[in-house]
Image (cartoon, helix red, strand yellow):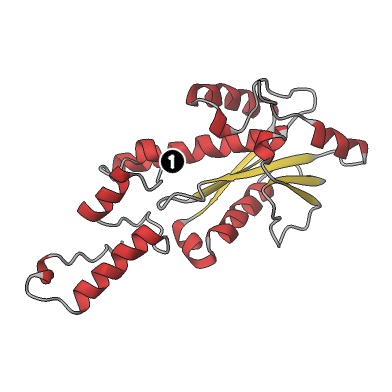
Amino acid sequence: MANLPTYEYEANLQLNGSSIIAGVDEVGRGPIAGPVYAAAVILSPSHIPLGLNDSKKLSAKQRKLICKDIRKHADVSIASASEREIEKLNILHASHLAMMRAIGGLKSTPDHILIDGNLIPRDLNIPATAIVKGDASCASIAAASIIAKIERDQFMYDLGQQFPGYGWEKNVGYPTLQHLKALQDIGITPYHRQTFKPVHNILYQDCLLYTSPSPRDATLSRMPSSA
């Protein structure tokens, strides 16, 4: 049986004088549509939810049950960075922006932050440790990964009802075959990330068709909505 995340990182920090430790994780770096989400979680040392794990290793039902337990006993904050912020900053810095917003939304100010990955947001002025694959080894980060995934998945599900055809209810914005086909057939929405390759390629193609159309190509031209 694979090892589950533990509270060992947090316990060691507490032994060295840090009393309030937050785990932070993001979700949504790979999709070509939708915002990137981040969550910050301060677990109660007296109540570590059972079954904590990397959110990707849990079923939707398991995530919902654990999420309910986390929210009942922990300090939780969720934030996001929009598609336009992703385009302006790039996905890494937009992810860090979402993390900073999530940390800032906690009820308590942490003494130390545990962050999934190998980089710490450059504007973070709280002591922090980056942990590669932290969502699989650190309880607080695992909790944050579950919260962030549930929130973003629900957002993309709701968005899928407004923009049918792209399959966002299931692919949550990732470039599946259905999603890529819908981009060609239906077009680009305001929620697509215009700097990501599949979307950018269509925008570039449409721009060429619009600026120099032949009689035949003019009927194929499809400029994106400015909404």
Q: Quadrant of residue 56?
A: top right
Residue 226 seen: no
In the image, is 99 to the left or to the right of 33?
right
Question: Residue 108, how many percent across, how many down?
Answer: 75, 42
Residue depicted at 70% across the width and 46% down the height: 115
Q: Quadrant of residue 20?
A: top right
- Would you say 113 lies left or right of 85 here? right
Indicate the quadrant containing the N terminus: top left, top right, bottom left or bottom right: top right
The x and y percentages for residue 148 are: 56, 39
Specify the amino acid type for callout 1. Answer: Phe
Residue 136 lies, with reference to residue 166, above or below; the image says: above
Give percent across and percent down for residue 226. Answer: 30, 65
For image coordinates 63% across by 29% down, the residue present is 53
Name the residue carrying label 1. 155
Label 1: element kind: helix
Q: Quadrant of the C terminus?
A: bottom left
Q: Closest to the observer: 140 or 4?
A: 4
- What percent of the width, then of the height, locates residue 137? 71, 34
Tell me the quarter of the picture where residue 40 sits.
top right
212 left or right, relative to 42:
left
| Total marks placed | 1
Q: Residue furthest bottom?
A: 212
Looking at the image, residue 101 sits to the left or right of residue 177; the answer is right
The outermost residue toward the right is 16
| Residue nearer the viewer, 38 or 53 | 53
